[in-house]
Image (cartoon, rainbow, N blue to C red):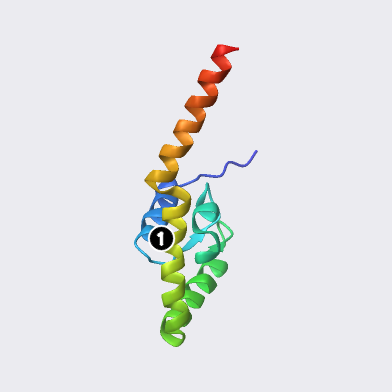
Amino acid sequence: MRHMRVDFREVELAGNQEACGTPCVTTDVGDAAQIVGETGWVVPPRDAAALAEGIAAALKEWRERPDEWAGRQAAARERIVETFGLDRMVQAYRRVWGETVAEGRK
């Protein structure tokens, strides 16, 4: 059985970078693809060529298409705030707690 090591720091960094409006190139480990979504570049893990292509694509967009890059920056920030922001987290906890209390009353 082959074990795959997941570096959760990479996943955490992707979320932090996107929250700051920095589009990411990340490997598809843990929840990285879910965090980055369509606002960055997700490549297969352990594929150096794909990672290099992702980085090259990001740099090319940054250099040659600044308007698209700016749009991607705004979308990255918005995605993190809307999907993973504090308000969203509080709503999710309240929902879970409410469901738990309702189940306990049955």
Q: Residues within 10 Å of mark 1 (few under 14, many from 20)?
A: many
Instruction: Please report the residue visible at 46 percent of the width from the left and 85 percent of the height from the top.
Output: 65
Instruction: Please report the residue visible at 42 percent of the width from the left and 56 percent of the height from the top.
Output: 14
Image position, residue 92 (x, y; %): 48, 37
Q: Residue furthest bottom?
A: 64
45 above or below 68?
above
Q: Is residue 38 left or right of residue 86?
A: right
The quadrant of the rendering that contains the C terminus is: top right
Image position, residue 42 (x, y; %): 55, 62
| Residue 40 seen in this snapshot | no
Q: Quadrant of residue 71?
A: bottom left
Instruction: Please report the residue visible at 41 percent of the width from the left and 38 percent of the height from the top.
Output: 90
Residue, disc 1: 18
The mark tally for this picture is 1
9 above or below 51?
above
Question: In terms of depth relative to the viewer, which is nearer, 93 or 53?
Answer: 93
